[in-house]
């Protein structure tokens, strides 16, 4: 959204939808004051419609984390690692 004038033509879900049919994960906090749940739900609805229209609905994961603010906490991080494991393969740890 940093390209000059892009926000007059497209919103974040429109830009994110350019990734379809690739796997995508979107997480939001239910207590986020910057991107409120009503806006998140509308954005997720747009994303879902696009992924479904391309037969890729099973590759889209959207979640709202109750009580989570505008932060990427430990629980969310673990969820992302699990998602990455699913699509990229198991992590290995060294040491």
Image (cartoon, rainbow, N blue to C red):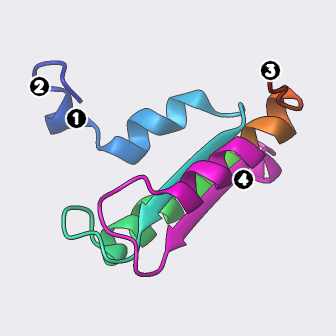
In three-dimensional space, the C-alpha distance between marks 4 and 2, rounded to whole angstroms, equals 29 Å
In three-dimensional space, the C-alpha distance between marks 1 and 3, rounded to whole angstroms, equals 46 Å
Q: Is residue 80 magenta?
A: yes
Coordinates of residue 94 in the picture (x, y in percent): 80, 20
Task: Indicate left or right for 91 with 65 as reference.
Answer: right
Q: Quadrant of residue 37?
A: bottom left
- State which region is magenta: 53-82
Task: Please tell me the numbered disc located at residue 9.
Answer: 1
Please report contact status of discs 1 and 3: CB closer than 8 Å, yes or no: no
| Mark toward the start of the polypeptide (4 vs 2) | 2
Q: Is residue 54 magenta?
A: yes
In three-dimensional space, the C-alpha distance between marks 3 and 2, rounded to whole angstroms, equals 46 Å
| Mark toward the start of the polypeptide (3 vs 2) | 2
| Mark toward the start of the polypeptide (4 vs 1) | 1
In three-dimensional space, the C-alpha distance between marks 4 and 1, rounded to whole angstroms, equals 23 Å
Would you name the residue on which mark 3 appears?
A: 94
At a point 82% along the width and 30% down the height, the residue shown is 91
Would you name the residue on which mark 4 appears?
A: 52
């Amino acid at each position: 959204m940093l390209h000059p004038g892009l926000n007059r033509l497209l919103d974040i879900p429109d830009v994110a939808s350019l990734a379809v049919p690739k796997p995508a994960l979107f997480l939001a906090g239910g207590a986020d004051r910057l991107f409120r749940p009503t806006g998140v739900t509308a954005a997720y609805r747009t994303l879902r419609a696009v992924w479904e229209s391309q037969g890729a609905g099973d590759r889209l994961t959207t979640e709202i984390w109750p009580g989570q603010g505008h932060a990427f906490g430990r629980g969310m991080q673990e969820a992302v690692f699990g998602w990455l494991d699913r699509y990229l393969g198991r992590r290995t740890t060294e040491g």
